[in-house]
Amino acid sequence: MIGLQTVPLLWYQILAAVLFTIGVVGVLVRRSALIIFMSIELMLNAVNLSLIAFSRQHGDMDGHIIVFFVMAVAAAEVSVGLAILVAIFRNRETANVDDVHLLKG
Amino acid sequence: MLEPLLFAMFSGVAIGCALGVVFHKNSVHCALLLVGVLLSLAGIFILLHAQFVAALQVIVYAGAIMVLFLFVVMLLNVKGEVPLLTPGAAKGFGFFFALLILVELLWTVLSPGGQEGAPSEAVGLPRDFGSPAALGRLLYTTWLYPFEITSILLLVAVVGAVVLAKRKFF
Amino acid sequence: MDLAFFIEALVKILVVLGFVLLGVPLIVWMERKVLGHMQDRIGPQRVGPFGLLQTIADGIKLFFKEDLVPAQADKVVFAIAPAISVVTALAAASVIPFGDQFRIFGRDVPLHITDVNIAILFLLGATSMGVYGVVLGGWASNSKYPLLGGLRASAQMISYELAMGVALVPIILMTGSLSLAQIGRAQDHMWFIVPQFVAFTIYVICAVAETNRAPFDLAEAETELVAGFHTEFSSMRFALYYLSEYANMMVVSAVAITCFLGAWHGPVLPGPVWFLIKLSLFLFFYVWLRATFPRLRYDQLMAFGWKVLLPVALVNLAVTAVVLVLKG
């Protein structure tokens, strides 16, 4: 048996909520595709934090495993997403998501 | 009494850097601030006895994914032409909905029912909690199937990235 | 108890820090002297006996030089980039065991600053953070050649880090531990270089690439890129990059010794002495490589890393795993 927790679970949850919200703000108000990507990473990390905190509270490592999967998915997402971004930038010379609207009627 | 102090420090850095990611003009600085968020979260993971995940966070997230980000940001070298914030009313809506989400999340967390199901006191942990060995044991028994699927996902991502990056398709 | 622990930690930190910081001038001197003799000339000989103080003199000269920052540079990032390089290199040194534990004043003193149970991961983490120092230095200069050098270096380092990590996994399988001290102790009877010669070869090649040394010094190839990522750096900032490069060399050599060359084990002499001897031989090997091989082309470098080293490392890992399971 190891260390007792002195910081209550609640604080971790509040921190995760705040980080998640900042990520949401980034996705909603920024127009650069790169920053939107980074904000999504921020949101994923906020969720990871709450998973780890719950894991600690329950003394159960399943949360760690889910974080592991989240990281793998994030890596896949970033590699493909950035490749798409580079392709768009090559063709249209822009990273602004509002400029990519050819499919809009 | 070290733990609350460290928690305050890491969370302060994390929130400060996160705000920087969203509101800084320069994309490279944004990427660096995101690295700051990731590293301070790794610190918090260690506080929560998740050493292996913290190491993964540094190696995979901060060390590989973010380098990729930085690479693309430098390669594209987008300067100034993207407006910092969404123009017009959409910006107001954006902030409004974000606020709504924050209120909702905090409501869920702080309401009396929010803590239901979780043990009120953190339970004592087994010695090997968060160690690579314990995580590996879980990963290759209970979670074997999702694990294998993840490897296929990564393979698909690699192939997809290579195909997208090839010039002749465009 | 607590005070003793504190003092012990402090002493060890000072010893390791002092060793790395004082070791760097010595290595630079050795490199110049050895390179000189291999190229049929004498090398530094004016300052101090055998030119031993040459590097110190160079350091003092750099210290007094004007601190130039390019007008268009990103000032903040320009300032922190060299610091990142040095900090990560020194942080990595903190988990290296340089001897077995011994008893003094009734305390068991292990000869490493700290032995976290994920020491190898810590090392990989520190090296992967080290990429930032190089790539940011290149970007912040806001100049053509440094940017190219920085991009090259980042691609090279993340590619070779992969093969390096996979080459270390068989060692972890064989000892069943991620702690470097445990790995060192496990080589009491047989050095891991014997069963894991393939992994050792891969590790050494990756280590050279990881530290941006010849023949893999594409990031600072002077014929193409002036001086690569640190072209615009002068004075102390340049000295910091220089320091971090050699500190990194020491760290990767120390890891090679700990994981493959029997750590501190050796007959007659005490552990730390053996460790020092092996470290010097390994660093000599580094210089020898530089004097022998021409620089690779960039596409050759990437192709070699991804199409040769990584597959071989993976096959080696699979074979090791199968053999270990069959042996029970």
Image: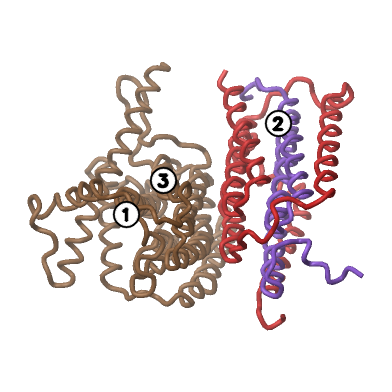
Chain C hue? Answer: brown
Q: Disc 3: which chain?
A: C
Q: Is residue C300 visible?
A: yes
Chain B hue? Answer: red
Spatial separation of the CA atoms under disc 3 and disc 2: 35 Å
Residue type indicated by callout 1: Ser
Residue at horizontal 32%, vertical 29%? C11
Residue A104 in the image: state x and y as whole percent: 88, 68
Q: Which residue is disc 1 drawn over?
A: C234
Q: Which residue is disc 2 drawn over?
A: A56
Q: Which residue is disc 3 drawn over?
A: C83
Residue at horizontal 61%, vertical 43%? B38
Q: Residues within 10 Å of mark 3 (few under 14, many from 20)?
A: some
Residue C56 in the image: state x and y as whole percent: 19, 48
Q: Quadrant of residue B168?
A: bottom right
- Compared with B53, B152 (above or below) is below
Q: Residues within 10 Å of mark 2 (few under 14, many from 20)?
A: many
Residue type indicated by callout 3: Ala
Q: Quadrant of the image for the C terminus of chain A?
A: bottom right
